[in-house]
Image (tube, rainbow, N blue to C red):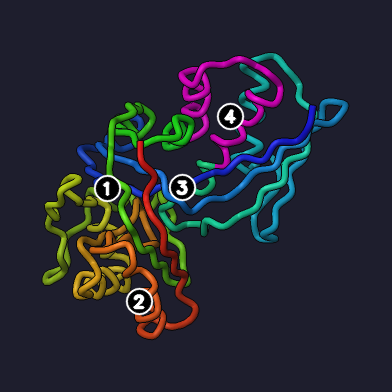
Amino acid sequence: MSAITLQAPAKTNLWLRVTRKRDDGFHEIDTRMVPLSLSDSLKIKPTTGNTVSLTCNEPDVPIDEGNLVMKAVRALEERTGHRFGAEIHLEKQIPHGAGLGGGSSDAATALRGFNELFDLGLERSVLAEIAGSIGSDIPFFVWETVCDCTGRGEIVTPVEFDWELPVFLMKPGFAVPTGPAYGLWTESREIPGIPYAPQLCPWGTMVNDLERPVFQKYLMLARMKEWLLDQREVHAAMLSGSGSSLLAVLTRNDRGRILEERALQTFGPNTWTWVGHTLRA
């Protein structure tokens, strides 16, 4: 068997509604997730024996059993009864703690890759079930398409979505952990003067209920959203997932680089920026 290399796309949420806190401590959500043209990549090379190793181009990314990629492999081994021998190399492009699902996508891509490389023959629904045992938004990435997600995010329904939206992302030099963002949701309040209202768009209503707790803790993100909404190139803007990246849908495909240059001038060269597009269903 030869090695394979697979892309692990980032995601964003076109809307994210938090409906209640569940008895199990998770939160019930209703969200539409879309994959982005931004991606990590995983190279999986089979080896003799039954040892799986992980390397990464980013030295700050843990490569031990706590990495979601390794957790995915172990969950697959437990489900199938196989012990795999493989070397995995992860090339990171998706920033950590940005609300873009990088680690979850890497894990789902590992499941898809091992299923293909070792000819396991598992259906996507089975891979999604395994993915759901590892993390709430990992099943979405198994389907490789636009999906509506409910429950804690693990109930995934692929949907038709013909839009390929031009988007711009920017992120300050800090991350926002997902758990605390949800944990603060119940007690959080809106900041007067900050725009939280749903934005009506041809592809759906863009709104993110996590803006309330995240903006309350990280006021700079609220100011960045305000700035984006003031730019003539921006059709709609909001927090991506739990942050810390901000998503802007652009008015035209050719406006991203202009906006990127202005954002770096305004917020400084340490701001992470990206110009690309959503992927169609």
Whole-percent x and y of residue 86? 78, 33
What's under tag 1, amino acid-wise?
Answer: Leu
Helix, strand or loop for disc 4: helix
Discs 3, 4 touching: Cβ within 8 Å: no
Tell me the residue that label 1 is attached to.
14
CA separation in Å, label 4 and label 2: 37 Å
The mark lying in front, picked from 3 and 4, is: 4
The mark lying in front, picked from 1 and 2, is: 2
Front residue of 12/16: it is: 12
Tell me the residue that label 2 is attached to.
258
Stretch of the chain drawn in magenta = 106-135
Q: Main secondary structure of the magenta part?
A: helix
Confirm whether the magenta stretch covers residue 29: no
CA separation in Å, label 1 and label 2: 23 Å
Whole-percent x and y of residue 179? 41, 48
Q: Residue furthest bottom?
A: 265
For the N terminus, give its image quadrant: top right
Tell me the residue that label 3 is attached to.
101
Q: Quadrant of residue 34?
A: top left
Tell me the residue that label 4 is attached to.
112
Tell me: residue 205, above or below residue 216. Answer: above
What's under tag 3, amino acid-wise?
Answer: Gly
Helix, strand or loop for disc 3: loop
Q: Is residue 89 visible?
A: yes
Counting residues from the start of the chain, the first of labels 3 and 2 encountered is 3
Q: Is residue 23 visible?
A: no
What's under tag 4, amino acid-wise?
Answer: Arg
State the residue at coordinates (64%, 55%). Answer: 61
State the residue at coordinates (31%, 65%). Answer: 217
Counting residues from the start of the chain, the first of labels 1 and 4 encountered is 1
Front residue of 86/132: it is: 86
